[in-house]
Amino acid sequence: MGSRTEHFVDGHARGIPVSPGIAIGPAYLYAKVSFEVEERKLEEDVLGKELERFEEAVKKAERDLNKISSITREKLGENRAAIFEAQLLMLRDESLYPEVVSFIQKQAVNAGFAVKTVMSRHRRIMEASDNEYLRERANDLLDIQERIIRHLRRGRILSAVDENSIVISENLTAADIILFSRRGILGCATDFGGPTSHVSIMARALHVPAVVSTHGLTHQIKTGDLVILDGIKGDVIVNPDAKTLSHYKTKLKRYQRLIQEDRSLVPLPAETLDGYKVQLQANLELIDELPQLKEYGAEGIGLYRTEMALLMQGKVLVTEEEQFGQYREVVKATSPHSTTFRILDLGGDKMLPMGAREHNPFLGWRGIRIMLDKKELLIPQLRAMLRASAYGPTRILLPMVTSIGEIRLFKQILAETIADLEKEGVEIDKNIPIGTMVEVPSVALAADQFAKETDFFSIGTNDLTQYTLAVDRGNDLVADLYDELHPAVLQLIQLTTKAAKKAGIPVSLCGELATNLRAVPVLLGLGIDTFSASPIYLPGIKRVIRAMKLAEGQELARRALQAADPDEFRTYVDKWLEEHACGVSFFLEGK
Ligand code: PEP
Ligand code: MG
């Protein structure tokens, strides 16, 4: 890529990969036909007719959404269909529908103008919200608005998308991706959106390779351009030269073969050639994802991020009962394996209670710091987790710990909460293990002391890397400095595993580094024997583990720790992986 501020260089855009896979094919530039709606003043005597037209358009939108919802239910199950059920409810929402009706009546205007005015106003409020979930749901409202307006204009709902094309669009809705996938598109890329937007979740579930947040790619491309979309790395290459094209064609074939092979690995153990056993667990954040535990062979949940469930509800305070309902479902589905719930990790780039603003949020009020200050958040969540622990093995994990005092204070609150529940006669696991996230260098450096205070460690390399290297993990401008294989990061991992071993407590690694196949043998060598990652990556990790011996990992770790230049080490380990015929080398571009 070019300089740090350029996003499209030499026909190459980089976005966020949200659904793995590789697609090569013609671009289809999908521009939503947004109908311009002009204000038209109407005579009193035709207002009744206009209201009927509005109601008719809403009914048609309901028919569309019912159809999309039933396709989704059939293809992806009840949970996913919920998105469209929610849109159906929005259509008749008591603060929207009557407002449009009254706007038509009071202003004596056409229905299209009323729909646009009222819904845009609601959308702007959602877009300005601090809540990521609400901001993303603003897209649902736009989808509804356009659907009704198109019906008012008797327009077509979906412009024809060619089969075997790669859809490039500013934004897509969950409905778009469902209908497109039925038409057999090869992949999609959008200028906007994040990993938790509906389109990303749907694309993963439908196995459509996807890249989001491509920063204006739609302005650089036209329908029919040849596109390579790499949903593993997040690259989109427009009109590639012959060499790049042939490289990616080979890559695509290998990817397809690997996916087949990966499937056959699911029932096999994650064990090195010399019999060293590794545990592979899942990082999850949504109940919808529970079926993936079996699909990808996860032995439990190593990290359940609880922020998402709150964001889905669009509010910070979810009741104990609501949380308990979810946690119980998760524990039951994961049992007999264990579920590791992390208490809320708010702050940083995630929302803050009461919309507090900070100049330097990643060094500010975050994770356990907030939870110890806000008992009204911590106690209901703890009670819900403890109650869920009666249904299967459960552990609690503390994010963003920096000092032992925080763990001690947490344990005091936990003991009081346990005592309350026992008094109430509620069944719980009162010896529930409490773990510490190792995300800040202070914890790794003093791991010996921390190991005495905690039942297990979980190394969060996403944050550990940013705090060790002083590189904001979400900042494009310095992304090239974010290096998880930096010897300093690896040393901190080693300090942690050594301390854990000495104290006899388990340690796992749950950051994205676990999915970096180049790092897997090194991590084994550093003493990691439990990996937790998004389930889709587990078979690939297993493939590497099954192709190596522990001593080889130890030798690679020794080299990595001493590497003056991590890039040199990368070249070395790539060659090693190639020789060991893991067939993974093409996953290894970049860092
Ligand atoms: C991490 O920091 O590595 C981690 C797993 O936590 P999160 O990505 O949720 O901050
Ligand atoms: Mg973290």
Image: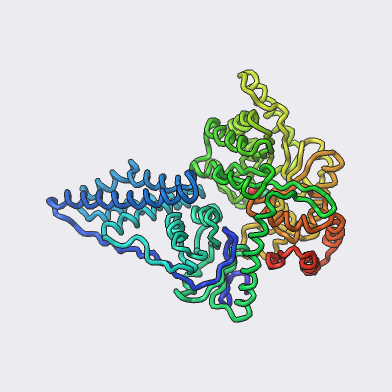
Q: Which residue is located at x 48 percent, y 72 percent?
A: 27
Q: Height in image: 177 above or below 244?
A: above
Could you say where residue 33 lies in the image, as x and y percent from the top left? 35, 65
- Seen as rendered, the residue at the extreme left is 45
Q: Residue at x 52, y 72 (%)?
A: 25
Rendered image coloring scheme: rainbow
Which quadrant is home to the C terminus? bottom right
Decide if residue 194 is on the left or right side of residue 506.
left
Q: Position of residue 391 (x, y in %)?
A: 63, 30
Viewport quadrant of the N terminus = bottom right
| 162 to the left or right of 435 | left
Q: Is residue 322 positioned above or below 524 on the image?
A: above
Residue sitting nearer the eye, 45 or 332: 332
Q: Residue furthest bottom?
A: 242
x%, y% of residue 10? 58, 78
**Can the viewer see residue 15?**
yes
Residue sitting nearer the eye, 110 or 583: 583
Q: Is residue 125 visible?
A: no
